[in-house]
């Protein structure tokens, strides 16, 4: 709550505190704030933020909310091939067991500058922020 009150997701708020860097960066730490400065990938292809290494939380880029992430919520059950004939049930066509229900999060190019973009992540469960990546997806 204190991080939200301090507006850590904004440029002004994020510059009001000293951030830990390098080998001191906490991984798999619940209730942690992370900050990165990113350059926009070249080209015009749609952009996505890969949050597959994180647990659950929220993301902002340049002070704008990308939304909530929850890749630690994974599909469970008996996975097999899909057979679409017959009546649908909740157990039919379960695929990608053990994988996140969502890993990639769209980032509008209009929100980015060519360089020096502020990404802030609030992580509730813990994860590895060193594996977060902003990539062009075609």
Image (cartoon, grey):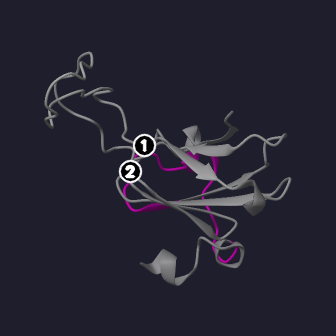
Q: Quadrant of residue 35?
A: bottom right
Residue 51 vs residue 106: left or right? Answer: left
What is the crowding at mark 2: few (fewer than 14 residues within 10 Å), some, or many (at least 20)?
many
Q: Position of residue 78 (x, y in %)?
A: 16, 23
Dot 2 or dot 1, earlier in sequence: 2
The residue closer to the viewer here, 85 or 74, is 85
Q: Are marks 2 and 1 in contact (CB under 8 Å)?
A: yes
Label drawn at residue 102? 1
The residue closer to the viewer here, 38 or 40, is 40
Query: In percent of the image, x 13 and y 31: which residue is there?
Result: 87
What residue would you read off at disc 2? 70
Q: Is residue 5 above or below residue 84?
A: below
Of the residues tagged 2 and 1, which is closer to the observer? 1
Query: In percent of the image, x 21 and y 33: which residue is there?
Result: 76
Query: In percent of the image, x 22 and y 21: which residue is there?
Result: 79
Q: Is residue 81 above or below residue 121?
A: above
Residue 1 vs residue 83: left or right? Answer: right
Q: Is residue 85 above or below residue 69?
A: above
Q: Is residue 67 magenta?
A: no
Secondary element at image label 2: loop
Q: From which residue to which does the magenta span run?
A: 15-33
> Which image quarter is the C terminus in?
top right
Residue 137 vs residue 23: left or right? Answer: right
Q: Position of residue 123 (x, y in %)?
A: 44, 57
Q: CA distance from mark 2 to mark 1?
A: 7 Å
Query: In percent of the image, x 28 and y 28: which residue is there?
Result: 97
Residue positioned most to the bottom:
5
Q: Position of residue 124 (x, y in %)?
A: 37, 59
């Amino acid at each position: 709550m204190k991080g939200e009150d301090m507006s850590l997701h904004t440029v002004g708020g994020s510059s009001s505190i000293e951030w830990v860097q390098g080998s001191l960066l906490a991984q798999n730490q619940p209730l942690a704030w992370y900050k990165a400065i990113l350059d926009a990938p070249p080209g015009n292809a749609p952009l996505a933020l890969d949050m597959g290494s994180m647990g659950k939380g929220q993301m902002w880029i340049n002070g704008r909310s990308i939304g909530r992430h929850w890749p630690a919520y994974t599909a469970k059950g008996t996975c097999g091939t899909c057979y679409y004939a017959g009546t649908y049930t909740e157990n039919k066509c379960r695929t990608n067991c053990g994988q996140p229900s969502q890993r990639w999060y769209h980032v509008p190019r209009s929100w980015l500058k060519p360089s020096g973009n502020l990404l802030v992540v609030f992580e509730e469960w813990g994860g590895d922020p060193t594996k977060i990546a902003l990539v062009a997806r075609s």
